[in-house]
Amino acid sequence: MNRVFVDTSAIFSLLTPEDRAHHRAKQAFSALTGREAKLITSSYVLVETHALLGRRFGIVANERLREDFEPLVDVVWVDRDLHQKGLDLLIARGRRGLSLVDATSFVLIDEQRIDEVFAFDRHFEAEGFIIA
């Protein structure tokens, strides 16, 4: 069974029909569930996604994320160690636009030996991860 990390960009596109990547997100998600991939995300990704959806669409979007999507993924809760490693990576990369959430995700993907990433964020591809 493949283990696939799910990023904010994919969740947002999947849950937002108006998003330009919505159709691709639906197709990719369908393919992942069809092959019974194990979907993994982090608590930081969920915080980022809740903030984005809440700002753009209100509390109903937060409820939809919690009820419709969160039960489908295993959540790795970011602890102090993972946070520090993500911050170290962020500083070491020194790339404008790279976020702490992304850097922490990169560390998590490496440490957990995750096979693929479900994302539409160019930083994951630039980092060399296989995009689902």
Image: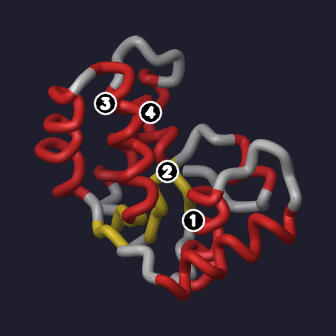
Image spot of residue 16 (x, y percent): 35, 22
What colour scheme has been applied to the protein in the rendered image? secondary structure
Measure the alpha-carbon separation of dots 1 and 2.
8 Å
Measure the alpha-carbon separation of dots 3 and 4.
20 Å
Q: Indicate left or right for 15 with 114 as reference.
A: left
The circle drawn on residue 66 is: none
Q: Can I make out residue 115 in this image?
A: yes
Image spot of residue 46 (x, y percent): 36, 53
Residue, disc 1: 105
Q: Of callouts 4 and 1, which one flags the residue occurring earlier in the amino acid sequence?
A: 4
Q: Of callouts 3 and 1, which one flags the residue occurring earlier in the amino acid sequence?
A: 3
Residue sitting farthest toward the top = 18
Q: Can I make out residue 41 in this image?
A: no
Image spot of residue 84 (x, y percent): 62, 80
Amino acid type of the residue tagged 1 in the rendering = Ser
The circle drawn on residue 7 is: 2
Q: Is residue 23 above or below residue 96?
A: above
Measure the alpha-carbon separation of dots 2 and 4.
11 Å
Measure the alpha-carbon separation of dots 3 and 1.
22 Å
Whether residues under marks 3 and 4 lie with C-beta atoms below 8 angstroms apart, the answer is no
Q: Of callouts 1 and 2, which one flags the residue occurring earlier in the amino acid sequence?
A: 2
Whether residues under marks 1 and 2 lie with C-beta atoms below 8 angstroms apart, the answer is yes
